[in-house]
Amino acid sequence: MSERTSDPKGGPKSGPKGDSEEWKARGVFLRVFVYVFATHLFAGFVWILFYVGGHADK
């Protein structure tokens, strides 16, 4: 079996190099990227709704 197992807290077990902090930093970066992308996608959708609504025949 592999020597590297999961930590009880859910993250990877830190090895001799202390890569647990690097793993956490990557997780934070990924989460921030997804949140920013999703927010911009939602804002673009709302902008399109206002644009189409403003140019609709009344």
Image (spheres, rainbow, N blue to C red):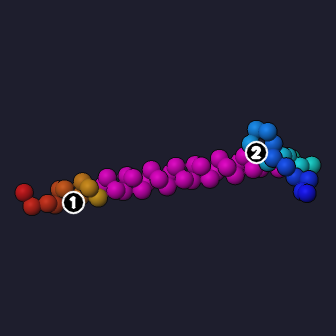
Q: Is residue 45 magenta?
A: yes
Q: Please, which residue is most extreme toward the left here?
A: 58
Which residue corresponds to mark 2?
11
Magenta stretch secondary structure, dominant: helix
Query: Could one spot residue 45 in this view of the protein?
Result: yes
Q: Is residue 30 left or right of residue 39?
A: right
Q: Which numbered disc flags the more N-terminal residue, 2 or 1? A: 2
Discs 2, 1 touching: Cβ within 8 Å: no
Residue plotted at (81% across, 42% down): 7
Which residues are drawn in magenta?
Answer: 19-47
Vertically, is 21 above or below 45?
A: above
Give the residue at x 24% y 54%: 50
The image shows a total of numbered marks equal to 2
Asked where in the image residue 51 lies, by quadrant, the reply is bottom left
Which quarter of the image is occupied by the C terminus? bottom left
Quadrant of the snapshot with the N terminus:
bottom right
Looking at the rendered structure, the secondary structure element under dot 1 is helix
Which residue: 62% across, 53% down? 30
Q: Which residue is mark 1?
A: 52
